[in-house]
Every structure is written in C-alpha cells, then in structure tokens.
C-alpha cells in the first residue's frame, strides 16, 4: 500500500511552501504527495494533481481530484472512503483535519463553505463524483455509499437545508 497525501493549493501555499522542515516531515510519512494547484512551483518530490478540466467553469471537489488521479495512475482501485459528505452535515471537518478555516469564526466558516459550494458548482461536482465512484471498488464505506446514492435533487435539498447561503452578501 502506498501512502498518499493530497493537499489543496491554499494549504500548500500557507503551510508547506517555504517550510522545509514540515515538508521533510511529510516526505518521511507519505510516499507520494500530490498538490492540487495550477500555478505554484512545486519542489521535488511533490507532484501536481492532474485535473479533469482547466476551462475555469468549475473547480472539482478534492475527493474527485483524488479519485481521478488514483485511477489515472493505477486503473481500477479498491478503497475505503470515510468522512466525506459533500457539506451535507452541519459540522464540516473533524477536529483532526488540518484546515485553514478552523481558526475562523463560525459565521465566517459558514460563509466560506457556502462560497466554496458555489465556486465548485456542487451540482456538477456531485454528478462528477458519482461517475468517478462507478470506476472504483468501494470497501465498506457505508456512510459514503448512502451519500453517493442520493439523487442530485436530494443532494441539493440536503445542502440547502444545512448550509446558510444567506451568509453570503
């Protein structure tokens, strides 16, 4: 089994870029580190994620990027997916998940993730994720299987109930 670390560009630029000690720690634990960014200069051994599209019309959810890159590298994969709910729960991240927004106020966190859902085009991303998941073998992943089996209408209804889109002004 290969230990992968996928990180988004915001996390890379604010926590890893220029922090040689932290990068060395990551390199000691992970065999492959993939950064989903389009413009940062990445030192070896970091690799740039392959993207499904570069036309700027949407930005894929990180889980879609991860699955896409793993399929490109390994073909059919078997994996467990835990903790991803497409922002359908009030609590966005577990406490152990390193996120830059954890230090924000609750109101600003909500605004950030509502904006993120709009920028990422939640509807398209959900459809994309459903298609990518058809190409992998899900092991266990009971909660994720329930999530991914939602219809697009059910998914949009769930996020519209849980997320406070009025926080965007």
Image (cartoon, rainbow, N blue to C red):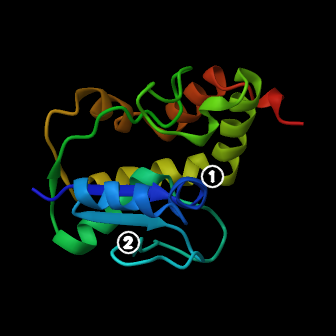
Q: Which residue is mark 2?
A: 46
Image quadrant where residue 57 sits: bottom right
Indicate the secondary structure of the residue bearing disc 2.
loop
Q: Are marks 1 and 2 in contact (CB under 8 Å)?
A: no
Residue 132 seen in this snapshot: no
Q: Position of residue 24 (x, y in %)?
A: 34, 61
Q: Residue at x 65, y 37 (%)?
A: 113
Residue closest to the eye, 118 or 29 = 29
The answer to whether one can see residue 142 in this image is yes
Residue 154 to residue 11: above or below: above
Instruction: Please give the residue where the numbered disc 1 appears in the rendered image.
Output: 121
**For this view, does 156 lie left or right of residue 151?**
right
Q: In the image, 78: left or right of 73?
A: left
Tell me the residue at 36%/38% (across/down): 148
- Viewer-nearest residue: 108 or 162: 108
Could you say where residue 60 lies in the image, as x and y percent from the top left? 52, 59
24 relative position to 159: left or right: left
The Cα atoms of the two marked residues, 1 and 2, are separated by 28 Å
**Which x, y percent locates residue 27?**
29, 61
Residue at image location 37% in from the left, 50% down from the top: 130
Q: Residue at x 29, y 34 (%)?
A: 82
Q: Is the residue marked by circle 2 packed among few (<14), some (14-19), or many (20+) residues within 10 Å?
A: some
In this rendered view, identify the residue nearer to me: 3 or 112. Answer: 3
Q: Secondary structure at mark 1?
A: loop
Which callout, 1 or 2, points at the residue further toward the start of the chain? Answer: 2
Q: Height in image: 48 above or below 146?
A: below
Q: Residues within 10 Å of mark 1 (few under 14, many from 20)?
A: some
Q: Quadrant of the N terminus?
A: bottom left
Give the residue at the far right of this rendering. Answer: 169
């Amino acid at each position: 089994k290969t230990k992968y670390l996928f990180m988004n560009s915001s996390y890379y630029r604010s926590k890893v870029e220029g922090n040689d000690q932290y990068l060395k720690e990551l390199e000691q634990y992970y065999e492959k580190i993939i950064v989903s960014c389009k413009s940062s200069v990445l030192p070896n051994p970091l690799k740039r994620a392959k993207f499904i599209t570069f036309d700027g019309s949407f930005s894929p959810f990180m889980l879609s990027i991860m699955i896409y890159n793993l399929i490109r590298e390994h073909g059919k994969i078997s994996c467990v997916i835990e903790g991803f709910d497409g922002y359908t729960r009030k609590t966005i991240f577990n406490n152990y998940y390193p996120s830059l927004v954890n230090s924000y106020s609750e109101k600003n966190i909500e605004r950030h993730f509502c904006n993120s859902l709009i920028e990422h085009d939640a509807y398209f991303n959900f459809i994309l994720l459903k298609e990518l998941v058809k190409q992998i073998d899900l092991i266990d992943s009971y909660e994720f299987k329930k999530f991914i089996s939602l219809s697009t209408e059910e998914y949009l209804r769930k996020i519209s109930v849980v997320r406070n889109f009025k926080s965007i002004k």
